[in-house]
Image (cartoon, coloured by chain):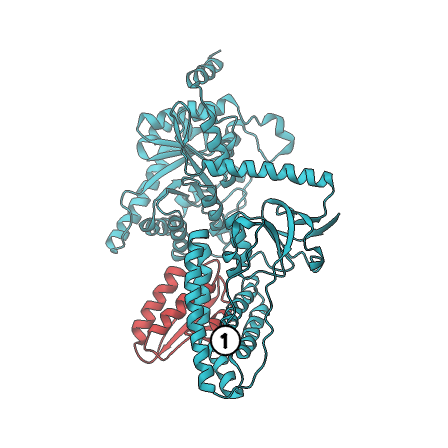
């Protein structure tokens, strides 16, 4: 048994026979030519043929891996048209009087080297794109088949590195996993493997040699390990994990596109919480029905100046566009307390958790707040956008917020800037005061979202970061549950809806209670969306009345 | 000659795809010379690899210069593209 370690580029486990993919590295001969014009014409014809092939590959990829994955072939088509690249090939043919194959190989080497030497990992990975298009041209020029090998039996495919176009053309039913000597996590192959759900381990190094051809191997895309000739114990372990993984994946596949609805017909929306644009992929992958909490703080924390309206707009627009019509709830600036940005020059405070933070900053520094509202209103033209205000405690605060929102809208109307007039807005219920006056707040807004983390902390007077207080921090405290029930009742009394976006929303032991309280939406980390949906769908017996009775009985005992 | 300066907002900078689209657009204008400057280095905006080689990242300030032909029209459209996509 030998273990090789690399880098897991696509999750999953596979066990099978190792087979080396021979990407027939082409030995290109340097040849003198007689007729330069003829050689240039041959080159033009090859370029046209390559462009046609790439257009076909684009269509195939579009079907297999969607628009994001297919983009690569659009990029290859653009690269093929690069003036410098084409000029270089032409001038080698013309000036040196040598064959087109050699001119392409030489040019391809120069350009891919240029990318490989850049100091940016993304651009370095583009070297393989240049190689890929050059190889394609050479194959066409030398009359070789550009389609790829096929296998009769499913294999674990090993290669030095795979060209993106090869990855797409391979018969996916015959590939259990990809393992490569080199490669990068940014390479299209890694991205495509992830999209297609095929395990991949890259950067295994030279130890992954052709001597291993035909051996039984186990691939672990989680840890990045490759085991050659595994002993029976290792094999057993891999097998068990593989089965677990497959079961989980199948379950999740079944849940995609399904509503989170109980056996007795109660429906709840399963949304995701995210803190930056980088999490969007996970939101889509896990089939969230919307974004219940988009924390906008990162824009402020990652910046060394107040983010401008256009900086913010670019991000908001991208998010709502990617969510294509699904609701995205942006929480306005929640800075202060443990989240500080130097340029805000917030005064040092004795007790920052109860200090100048979130909406209190916005109501104190109206210009910063308006800047964010304008960016959000502007982005509302591009999708279903809702705004949520944090740390509300009193009725006057939300009225003041509404005045500022209305002022901002009016300024935009006067400037002739369009936005969604009926944009939804709501408040976070994260202070006991807000829960208690939720009857009044519900009249003023479209929705509530309960932030259980802060609500618990303020209600129980316990700092949840403080380890020594763990036994005093009761996540299921009846007082907390009562706050949620009360807010929910008051929201519904006024025909409004209510969600929960704190950590407790993902606690499956609480799901039934939240449903009994009539919660309309639960927003959780992207990876918790489908397990939550599974939980909701597993509830068959309607015990809502029992739960409510039990809760009330406890409080009135 | 028309010129504008823009600070890249997109987290990924000028990646392959936006670079490709920019080149495609630039090629459509009559203006014979469209260049993008980043920190003293120039790239012809009609050439994909040259543009990518600049490795323009988030937060970088770039200056686009358009000479001859339909320069005002080109400047308007290109600036719009930067604002909406980069």
Vertical relation: A496 (above or below) A527: above
Colour of chain B as rendered: red
Above or below, B57 relative to B68: above
Instruction: Tell which of A325 and A45 is nearer to you.
Output: A45
Locate residue A485: give its quadrant.
Answer: top left
Please tell me how many numbered marks the rendered image carries.
1
Could you say where residue A451 lies in the image, as x and y percent from the top left? Answer: 46, 34
Q: Which residue is mark 1?
A: B40
Q: Is residue A9 visible?
A: no
Q: Which type of secondary structure does the marked residue at label 1 adopt? A: loop
Q: Picture quarter containing residue A497?
A: top left
Q: Where residue A386 sits in the image (x, y, percent)?
A: 36, 42
User: At x 51% / y 79%, what residue is drawn?
Assistant: A100
Q: Colour of chain A?
A: cyan
Decide which of A111, A240 is in the foreground and name it.
A240
Residue at 44% across, 73% down: A47
Q: Residues within 10 Å of mark 1 (few under 14, many from 20)?
A: few
* Residue furthest out toward the top: A557
Which one is in front, A193 or A288? A193
The answer to whether residue A443 shows anywhere in this view is: yes
Q: Position of residue A173 (x, y in %)?
A: 53, 48
């Amino acid at each position: 048994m030998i273990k090789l370690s690399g880098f897991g580029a696509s999750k999953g486990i596979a066990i099978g026979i190792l087979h080396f993919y021979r990407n027939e590295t082409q030995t290109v001969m340097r040849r003198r030519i007689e007729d330069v014009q003829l050689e240039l014409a041959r080159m033009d014809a090859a370029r046209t043929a390559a462009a046609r092939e790439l257009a076909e590959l684009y269509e195939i990829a579009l079907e297999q891996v969607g628009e994001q994955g297919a983009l690569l072939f659009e990029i290859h088509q653009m690269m093929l048209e690069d003036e410098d690249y084409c000029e270089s090939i032409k001038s080698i043919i013309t000036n040196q009087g040598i064959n087109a194959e050699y001119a392409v190989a030489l040019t391809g080497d120069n350009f891919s080297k240029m990318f490989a030497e850049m100091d940016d990992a993304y651009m370095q990975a583009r070297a393989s794109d240049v190689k890929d298009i050059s190889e394609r041209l050479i194959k066409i020029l030398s009359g070789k088949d550009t389609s790829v090998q096929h296998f009769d039996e499913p294999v674990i495919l090993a290669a030095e590195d795979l060209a993106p176009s090869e990855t797409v053309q391979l018969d996916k039913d015959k590939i259990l996993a990809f393992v490569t000597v080199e490669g990068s996590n940014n390479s299209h192959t890694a991205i495509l493997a992830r999209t297609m759900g095929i395990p991949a381990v890259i950067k295994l190094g030279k130890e992954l040699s052709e001597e291993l051809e035909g051996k039984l191997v186990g691939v672990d895309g989680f840890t990045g390990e490759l085991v050659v000739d595994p002993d029976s114990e290792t094999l057993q372990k891999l097998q068990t994990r593989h089965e677990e993984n497959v079961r989980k994946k199948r379950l999740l596949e079944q849940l995609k596109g399904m509503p989170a609805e109980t056996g007795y017909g109660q429906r709840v929306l399963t949304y995701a919480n995210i803190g930056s644009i980088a999490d969007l992929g996970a939101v889509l992958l896990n089939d969230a029905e919307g974004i219940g909490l988009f924390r906008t703080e990162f824009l402020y924390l990652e910046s060394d100046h107040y983010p401008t309206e256009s900086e913010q707009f670019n991000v908001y627009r991208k998010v709502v566009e990617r969510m294509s019509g699904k609701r995205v709830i942006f929480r306005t600036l929640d800075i202060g307390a443990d989240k500080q940005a130097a340029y805000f020059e917030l005064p040092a405070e004795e007790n920052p958790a109860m200090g100048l933070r979130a909406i209190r900053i916005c109501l104190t520094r109206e210009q910063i707040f308006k800047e964010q509202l304008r960016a959000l209103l502007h982005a509302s033209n591009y999708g279903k956008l809702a705004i949520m205000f944090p740390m509300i405690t009193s009725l006057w605060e939300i009225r003041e917020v509404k005045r500022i929102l209305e002022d901002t809208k009016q300024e935009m109307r006067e400037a002739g800037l369009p936005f969604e007039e009926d944009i939804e807005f709501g408040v976070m219920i994260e202070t006991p005061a807000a829960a208690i006056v939720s009857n009044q707040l519900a009249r003023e807004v479209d929705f509530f979202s309960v932030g259980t983390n802060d609500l618990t902390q303020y209600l129980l007077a316990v700092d949840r970061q403080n380890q020594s207080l763990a036994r005093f921090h009761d996540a299921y405290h009846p007082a907390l549950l009562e706050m949620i029930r009360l807010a929910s009742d008051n929201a519904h009394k006024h025909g409004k809806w209510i969600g929960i976006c704190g950590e407790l929303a993902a606690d499956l032991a609480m799901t039934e209670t939240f449903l009994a309280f009539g919660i309309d939406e639960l927003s959780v980390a992207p990876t918790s969306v489908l397990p939550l949906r599974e939980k909701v769908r597993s509830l068959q017996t309607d015990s809502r009345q029992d739960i409510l009775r039990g809760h009330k009985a406890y409080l009135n005992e | 000659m028309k010129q504008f300066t823009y600070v890249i907002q997109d987290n990924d900078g000028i990646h392959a795809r936006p670079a490709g689209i920019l080149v495609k657009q630039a090629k459509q204008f009559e203006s014979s010379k469209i260049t993008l400057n980043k920190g003293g280095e120039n790239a012809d905006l009609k050439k994909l690899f040259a543009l990518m080689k600049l490795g323009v990242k988030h937060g970088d300030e770039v200056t686009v210069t358009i000479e001859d032909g339909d320069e005002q029209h080109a400047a308007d459209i290109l600036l719009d593209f930067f604002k909406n996509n980069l």
